[in-house]
């Protein structure tokens, strides 16, 4: 359907420069079929700024003034924050039950650090913390969990720690009872568990932003590479590999594969799950 008269049109030429700029800054790649989707997601911001053309918006993002303030809006508009507790739990089970004992055995005095690199609203790092707590790991050694995302809106929700029904579709009921309290607007995660996570904003495409977090033994970067180009996945994975500690393990989503994209890690089986390990 063509856009209506009062909606700005994203022409094919402007789509390409805008799409490439977004790809360069955020890694997210829009192919030509998604031109209308991109226009729909960004149109409200043009409206708010009284802009009639996507070219003006492109100039704002590329050259400013005000570009730094505008990019967080673009991230919020384009980011897909679908996530829930206990998602793809086999990998977390593999980490806690299979890999962690080996990591600790390799150097019993070294604290363990885990980074959730695209944590969205926080269900993934909180699931990891719950699973570690259930297995008694927090009593045994210092474990640092960092969780970051590029979306300011997602991080506001993660820091608040209140979740609605959709987040609870897979988590066992007894853990909901144990770790959550009913509050207005949803269920609140137990403050002691929530406080185990260090929340931060980091864009995966910016080397300096990810380097401090990537210096971990374990990285979860799940269900974000599906939105990235192969070139940007390869670059991100290379930077992670360069900063990680050994033994180092990277988990990507079940629908994601690095096999044709990167040789920085080796695919290994861990229990019922797959993990990319530093050679
Ligand atoms: C579908 S969620 C994945 C959440 C969680 N990892 C999971 O698997 O359930 C994808 C997240 O990636 C984030 N994201 C997209 N591009 C990013 C980038 N360049 N840097 C950091 N996060 C990004 C989005 O903001 C969104 O919250």
Image: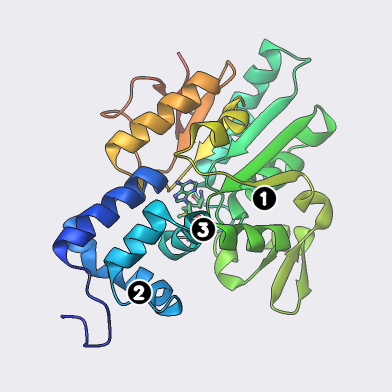
Q: Residues within 10 Å of mark 2 (few under 14, many from 20)?
A: many
> How far apart are the alpha carbons under marks 3 and 1?
24 Å
Image location of residue 52, percent across then percent down: 31, 77
Q: Secondary structure at mark 2?
A: helix
Q: Which mark is residue 126?
A: 1
Residue drawn at the location 72% of the way across and 63% of the way down: 160
> How far apart are the alpha carbons under marks 2 and 3?
15 Å
Residue drawn at the location 67% of the way across and 22% of the way down: 101
**Residue placed most toward the observer, 97 or 9:** 9
Image location of residue 262, percent across then percent down: 33, 25
Q: Quick check: 275 left or right of 174?
A: left
Q: Is residue 268 above or below residue 139?
A: above
Q: Is residue 221 above or below residue 151?
A: above
Q: Which residue is mark 2?
A: 43
Q: Is residue 219 above or below residue 72?
A: above
Residue drawn at the location 75% of the way across and 32% of the way down: 143
> How far apart are the alpha carbons under marks 1 and 2?
34 Å
Q: Secondary structure at mark 1?
A: helix
Q: Which mark is residue 199?
A: none
Q: Which residue is mark 3?
A: 72
Image location of residue 118, percent across then percent down: 52, 47
Q: Nearer the viewer, mark 1 or mark 2?
A: 2
């Amino acid at each position: 359907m063509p856009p209506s008269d009062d909606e700005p049109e994203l022409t094919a030429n402007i789509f390409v420069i805008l799409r490439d700029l977004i790809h360069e800054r955020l890694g997210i790649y829009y192919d030509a079929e998604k031109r209308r989707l991109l226009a729909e997601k960004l149109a409200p911001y043009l409206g708010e700024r009284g802009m009639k053309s996507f070219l003006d918006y492109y100039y704002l993002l590329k050259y400013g003034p005000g570009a730094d303030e505008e990019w967080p809006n673009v991230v919020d508009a384009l980011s897909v924050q679908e996530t829930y507790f206990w998602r793809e739990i086999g990998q977390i089970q593999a980490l806690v039950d299979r890999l962690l004992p080996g990591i600790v055995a390799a150097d019993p005095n070294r604290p363990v650090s885990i980074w959730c690199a695209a944590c969205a609203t926080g269900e993934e790092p909180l699931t990891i913390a719950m699973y570690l707590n259930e297995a008694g790991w927090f009593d045994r050694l210092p474990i640092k969990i960092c969780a970051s995302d590029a979306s300011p809106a997602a991080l506001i929700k993660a820091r608040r720690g209140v979740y609605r029904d959709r987040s609870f579709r897979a988590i066992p009921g007894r853990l909901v009872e144990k770790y959550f309290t009913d509050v207005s607007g949803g269920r609140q995660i137990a403050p002691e568990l929530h406080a185990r996570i260090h929340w931060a904003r980091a864009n995966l495409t910016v080397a300096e932003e990810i380097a401090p977090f990537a210096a971990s033994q374990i990285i979860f970067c799940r269900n974000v590479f599906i939105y990235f180009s192969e070139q940007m996945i390869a670059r991100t994975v290379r930077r992670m590999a360069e900063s990680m500690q050994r033994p180092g393990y990277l988990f990507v989503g079940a629908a994601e594969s690095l096999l044709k994209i990167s040789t920085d890690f080796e695919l290994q089986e861990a229990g019922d799950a797959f993990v990319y390990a530093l050679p």
